[in-house]
Structures are given as structure tokens and as C-alpha cells.
């Protein structure tokens, strides 16, 4: 059958029709345990009994209105995000890419306001910040960038978890205005920035009057067991892009800013048609409320530990498992060989997963995951891994 959808995704050969909790069903009636959560989006799983009526109520009132008018729900969600983060002001958009793009604009204008004509931003190897031309340029994946040159200038790329490299740039490059990184790299293979590095970066940014911009699009909103992954280090960023899990499936993005960055953008500098619409705001407000009511952050921490322990125990004595990384329900299992074929094999066994960076199995299940479901996930995944690693390397 001829498809009229652009050929931009390598899709698996089935379509999902509905879900409930941590389970989804395809159009043929087959059931799957959702270990991917829409790539860290379905915070509350599917058809959550508290979220659905709230969204139905909102759709019956208003889905969209322009930013020409006062927006009480924007104020309410912004206040909550500032309370949870300790930061001061929020700009709402619709995607993580937009949030990251806005962060880059904040950094550049911050530099221009300081009299730097060609501001530069430190970014990292293996980073992923989006697919617009600017966020693509900040991304550290040559495969993603291929065919889209010329890339945007103004980025200095460094290896992750290397403070000496940052200090050298601070000594030699007077145009740098910000450091931009994922607290835990997602697409790059679940690579955490170490706690001591995060603290060191905060110190360097304070010394240099740079912005510390932490991309929490994938690792934020309770996924690691704290509201934001950087909170494990006890620091605050100046700029924090959010998206994915904040709306439990309704598209939403946000840039949360602290004192150094909150007033950089003024009327006319930035905007969006869909950002801050009433449906997205209601989804964000309800998501955070339900997360608090149902204790989903401690659950994410406990279930993540349960999955890690189960995999380590189940893989004892098996060669080929290099490392398990991440925190809470953001887990990367690195193998010693490419493993994209496990996407379909896992689905055939009733489990939805992701493979990123060629050889890293990525688990991002809904934060409502139960202990029984965590055990079920391990029970499906471990035999698949054992069989896969027992075969000769291709």
C-alpha cells in the first residue's frame, strides 16, 4: 500500500490503538507492557482515571486561545514549576525542541546584552537537543547532522564530565556566555553528568557570569526520583528546558529561568502560537498534582532500582552486558554490540522498548509502574538479552 506520510521513521509493523495504565493494545488485539512511555512522555501511563476527566472538562471549555490575553492557567503552572525548581519565571511552548531553541536564544541575547557580538555556547559530545537547524547544531551526533549543513556557528563542543576542558575554554575564549547540556543524555545512550561535574559547572558559571542551561526535557518531571535530575547534585541552573513528561501526552514545553536569565527576553523577542494553550496548561497542572498525590517520584526511584537489580541478577554470568546506567525510571542497558533487532523481538514478546546509540536498550516506562509490572518487564527482557548475547557477534 502506498503511504502518503513522509518516510521519516523506521516503524515497527504494528499500530497501537489504546492503552490503560502501563499496558497498550495494537489494532490486532495484542497486548504489550509499555517500557517506553511514549519516549518519557506518558508520565501517568494511559487513560489515567484522574487525568482523563480533567482533560475532557477542559476540552469542553476551551482548547486554545491566543497569547493576546491574560492566561490564569499559565500563571498557575508557572508558579508550580517555580516552586518545585526554586527558579523564577517560565515561558511555555509546545515541544522540547522549542524549549531548547528558546534557551539558545536566551544565551545569545544574554551575550549581546553584555556587549559580546558573537556569543558562543559550550555543548557536548553525544548530546541531543532537537532537530531544528540551531538545536541540530548544538546536538553532538554527526549522523543526525548529516545532510543539513551549513550548521549554525557559535558552539564549542567538549567531552562530557571533563571540568578541565571547560576551564581551558574559560581561559582562552572570551566569547563564551553559557554551558548547555543534558543532565542525563537521553538519545546519546543514557549518559549521566556526574554530580561533582554538575557542581563544578555551576561554580564555573558563577565565576564567569555564564548561564548554566540544563536540558531536562527527557530526564525531568520526576523520572529520576526527584522533580529534576540536577536536584540530585543540590544545584540550580539558570535556564531549564522541559517538555515530554510535563503534559502526560499533551504536547507541552517550558523554559524555566532563574534570576540571571528571567528578564533576558522582553516583549517582541520571542513567542509562539500554541505555547501555553489552555489544554496543555491543564494537562501540566493535573500531571504535577497527580504525581504529588500518588507519590510517583519515590515510586520511580524504587521501581528503577527494582528493575536494575532484577536485570543484574538475571544476567549473572552472561558476557556482553557492558553497563547499566541512569537513575529512577530512566535506564540504559549498554551491550557490546548493536542491538536494534531487539526492538521487534521485545515487541513480539509483549514489551515496548527503545534502542538508542546503536547498542543501548533504553527503558522509560510510565512513573505509575507497579512492582509486579517491574518484575514482568525484567522477566520478559532478561531472556531476550541472554538469547541475544549467546549468539555469535555479527
Image (spheres, helix red, strand yellow):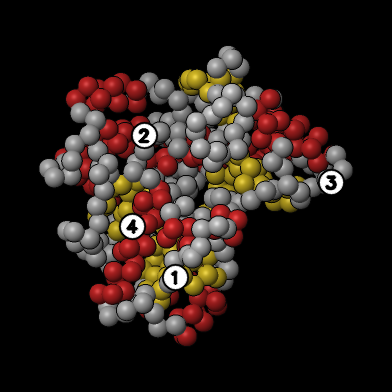
Q: Which residue is mark 1?
A: 153
Disc 4 crowd, CA 10 A, few/some/many (<14, 14-19, 20+): many
Alpha carbon distance from label 3 to label 4: 43 Å
Q: Quadrant of the C terminus?
A: top right
Q: Quadrant of the N terminus?
A: top right
Q: Relative to 211, does residue 371 appear above or below in the rendering?
A: above
Q: Relative to 38, does residue 112 appear above or below in the rendering?
A: below
Q: Which residue is mark 3?
A: 393
Disc 3 and disc 1 in contact, CB within 8 angstroms: no
Marked residue nearer the N-terminal end (3 or 2): 2
Alpha carbon distance from label 3 to label 2: 41 Å
Marked residue nearer the N-terminal end (1 or 2): 1
- Residue 44 or 139: which is nearer the viewer? 139
Residue 391: which disc?
A: none
Residue 392: in sight, yes or no?
A: yes
- Residue 192 or 275: which is nearer the viewer? 275
Residue 250: which disc?
A: 2
Residue located 44% across and 82% down the image: 173
Marked residue nearer the N-terminal end (3 or 4): 4
Amino acid at each position: 500500500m502506498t503511504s502518503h506520510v513522509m518516510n521519516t521513521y523506521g516503524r515497527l509493523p504494528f499500530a497501537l490503538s489504546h492503552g490503560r495504565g502501563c499496558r497498550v493494545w495494537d489494532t490486532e488485539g495484542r497486548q504489550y507492557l509499555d517500557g517506553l512511555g511514549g519516549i518519557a512522555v506518558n508520565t501517568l501511563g494511559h487513560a489515567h482515571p484522574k487525568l482523563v476527566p480533567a482533560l475532557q472538562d477542559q476540552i469542553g471549555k476551551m482548547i486554545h486561545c491566543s497569547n493576546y490575553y491574560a492566561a490564569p492557567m499559565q500563571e498557575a503552572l508557572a508558579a508550580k514549576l517555580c516552586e518545585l525548581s526554586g527558579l523564577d519565571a517560565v515561558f511555555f511552548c509546545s515541544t522540547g525542541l522549542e524549549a531548547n531553541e528558546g534557551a539558545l536564544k536566551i544565551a545569545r541575547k544574554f551575550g549581546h546584552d553584555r556587549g559580546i557580538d558573537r556569543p558562543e555556547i559550550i555543548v557536548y559530545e553525544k548530546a541531543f537537543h532537537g532537530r531544528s537547524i540551531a538545536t541540530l547544531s548544538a546536538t553532538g551526533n554527526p549522523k543526525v547532522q548529516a545532510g543539513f549543513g551549513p550548521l549554525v556557528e557559535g558552539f564549542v563542543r567538549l567531552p562530557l564530565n571533563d571540568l578541565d576542558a571547560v576551564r581551558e575554554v574559560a581561559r582562552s575564549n572570551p566569547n563564551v556566555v553559557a554551558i548547555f547540556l543534558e543532565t542525563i543524555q537521553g538519545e546519546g545512550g543514557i549518559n549521566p553528568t556526574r554530580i561533582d561535574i554538575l557542581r563544578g559547572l555551576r561554580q564555573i558559571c558563577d565565576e564567569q557570569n555564564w548561564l548554566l542551561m540544563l536540558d531536562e526535557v527527557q530526564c525531568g518531571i520526576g523520572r529520576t526520583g526527584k522533580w529534576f535530575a540536577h536536584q540530585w547534585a543540590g544545584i540550580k541552573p539558570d535556564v531549564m528546558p522541559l517538555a515530554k513528561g510535563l503534559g502526560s501526552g499533551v504536547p507541552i514545553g517550558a523554559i524555566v529561568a532563574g534570576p540571571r536569565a528571567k528578564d533576558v527576553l522582553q516583549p517582541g523577542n520571542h513567542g509562539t502560537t500554541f505555547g501555553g494553550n489552555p489544554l496543555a496548561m491543564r494537562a501540566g497542572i493535573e500531571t504535577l498534582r497527580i504525581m504529588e498525590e500518588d507519590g510517583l517520584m519515590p515510586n520511580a526511584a524504587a521501581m528503577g532500582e527494582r528493575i536494575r537489580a532484577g536485570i543484574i541478577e538475571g544476567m549473572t554470568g552472561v558476557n556482553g552486558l557492558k553497563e547499566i546506567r541512569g537513575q529512577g525510571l530512566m535506564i540504559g542497558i549498554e551491550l557490546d554490540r548493536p542491538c536494534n533487532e531487539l526492538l521487534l523481538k521485545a515487541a513480539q514478546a509483549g514489551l515496548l522498548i527503545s534502542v538508542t546509540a546503536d547498542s543501548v536498550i533504553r527503558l522509560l516506562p510510565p512513573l505509575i509502574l507497579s512492582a509486579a509490572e517491574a518484575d514482568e518487564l525484567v522477566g520478559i527482557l532478561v531472556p531476550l538479552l541472554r538469547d541475544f548475547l549467546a549468539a555469535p557477534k555479527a
